[in-house]
Image: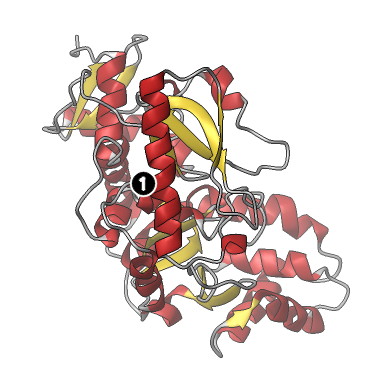
């Protein structure tokens, strides 16, 4: 029988690996790599995600990584826009391609009136060869070559089929604007993927467990969008690369061999977690950090995500910054103790001071963010 892990150990280990027990004194690129990228359909969410994890983080650091082309914003796992190391995007994007191909076939190809997906994609690749091009401009140029087709459909097909980076100023703290696209290799420079095939799948499993483990096979699959992982995970366990645990409900959890578990009595301070944060969203093992009924209260019909409040390491409410203000509003699911209220007030003050130091335009930093489909 595998050794057991308690609910408290499971929670604290996740928080420790996510730098949510103590902020890290590390560069932003190191934390982004450890998180295997950050969900980024809201261009500002990653800044809040790093602020709650890194001591002394300032937005200029991430702006520089984006303008220096070290990190990119690109449709990746589950077809969602990620902020990710450019070198990692090269080998992760092919793993994500089947999901994007499925979206292309089911949502877009069937709506074409008189052309083919291959023709649209070839033309998009040619148009992008001249350098970055705005999404609207790309759609119009494709529509000229494929009269009668919807601009949005043509652009979406290009986004699904080709590794398109959303280039700055979109994605910068002080930047804004509609998406402008470039091909990944044109943007960061040509190169071959570091990994491919089964070894790439293995590495993605390793990276996920390093940042989110111990985890179930279903959690790895939900986060990554990859199918049929059980056989590979069990093989990695037999090869002594992964360790197995019996989870709190008797489920099998996997982790990288040799990684330590956190002490369940480790204090977990109040944290204001970013919208769409993967510690809560796209989580097959969400029970370790949130009750299902409480998380359901954060889900909206239009797909918008609030920020999340963690108290003692678990979801306890939401937060937002109303547009045009510098106020951090919280909506807690229960009555906090005096100690928790004091801790929460200190974290709110920290966030407000961070925003003021950053000279942010508050209208650009509200955290009631667009739906998952917008801004792709």
Image quadrant assignment for residue 310: top left
Residue in front for this viewpoint, 207 or 368: 368
Q: Secondary structure at mark 1?
A: loop
Display colour scheme: secondary structure
Taking the view exactly as shown, the residue that stands out farthest to the left is 258
Residue 252 position in % (x across, y down): 31, 18
Left or right: where does residue 159 sit relative to residue 44?
A: right
x 49%, y 63%: residue = 74
How many residues crowd mark 1 within 10 Å: few (<14), some (14–19), many (20+)?
A: many
Residue ranking furthest to the bottom:
130
What is the tally of numbered marks visible in this picture? 1
Is 7 or 362 nearer to us in this picture? 362
Residue 160 in view, yes or no: no
Observer-nearest residue: 220 or 305? 305
Q: Is residue 227 above or below residue 62?
A: above
How far from the left and from the top, in percent, is residue 260? 14, 30
Q: Residue at x 52, y 29 (%)?
A: 317
Q: Which residue is mark 1?
A: 52
190 versus 95 height, above or below: below
Name which residue lies at 66% across and 49% down. 371
Identify the residue at horizontal 31%, vertical 15% (top origin): 7
Viewport quadrant of the C terminus: bottom right
Residue 5 x %, y %: 24, 15
Where is 78 relative to 288, above or below? Answer: below
Q: Of 273 and 93, which appears nearest the observer?
A: 273
Residue 79 visible somewhere in the drawing: yes
| Image location (x, y in percent) of residue 241 | 16, 35
Q: Quadrant of residue 178?
A: bottom right
């Amino acid at each position: 029988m595998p050794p057991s892990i308690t609910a408290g150990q499971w929670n604290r280990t996740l928080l420790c690996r996510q730098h949510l027990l103590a902020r890290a004194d590390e560069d932003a690129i190191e934390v982004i790599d450890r998180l295997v990228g950050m969900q980024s359909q809201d261009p500002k969410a990653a800044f809040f995600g790093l602020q709650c994890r890194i001591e002394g983080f300032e937005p200029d650091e991430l702006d520089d990584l984006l303008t220096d082309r070290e990190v990119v914003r690109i449709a990746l796992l589950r077809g969602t826009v990620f902020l990710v190391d450019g070198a990692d995007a090269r080998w992760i994007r092919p793993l994500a391609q089947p999901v994007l191909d499925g979206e292309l076939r089911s949502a877009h190809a069937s709506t074409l009136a008189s052309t083919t997906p291959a023709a649209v994609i070839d033309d998009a690749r040619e148009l992008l060869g001249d350098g970055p091009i705005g999404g609207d401009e790309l759609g119009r140029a494709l529509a000229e070559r494929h009269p009668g087709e919807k601009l949005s459909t043509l652009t979406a097909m290009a986004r699904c089929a080709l590794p398109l980076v959303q280039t700055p100023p979109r994605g910068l703290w002080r930047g804004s604007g509609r998406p402008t696209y470039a091909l990944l290799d044109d943007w960061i420079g040509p190169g071959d993927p570091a990994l491919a095939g089964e070894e790439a799948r293995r590495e993605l499993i390793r990276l996920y467990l390093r940042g989110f483990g111990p985890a179930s096979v279903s959690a790895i699959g939900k986060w990554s969008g990859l199918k049929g992982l059980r056989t590979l995970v069990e093989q990695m366990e037999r090869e002594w690369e992964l360790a197995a645990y019996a989870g709190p409900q008797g489920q099998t959890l996997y982790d990288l061999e040799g990684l330590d578990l956190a002490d369940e009595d480790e204090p977990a301070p109040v944290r204001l977690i970013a919208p769409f944060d993967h510690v809560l969203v796209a989580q097959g093992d969400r029970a370790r950090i949130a009750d299902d009924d409480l998380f359901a209260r954060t889900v909206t019909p239009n797909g918008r995500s609030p920020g999340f409040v963690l108290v003692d390491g678990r979801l306890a409410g939401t937060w937002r910054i109303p547009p045009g203000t510098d106020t951090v509003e919280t909506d807690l699911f229960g009555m906090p103790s005096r100690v928790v209220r004091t801790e929460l007030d200190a974290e709110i003050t920290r966030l407000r001071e961070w925003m003021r130091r950053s000279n942010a335009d508050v209208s650009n930093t509200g955290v009631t963010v667009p739906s998952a489909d917008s801004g792709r």
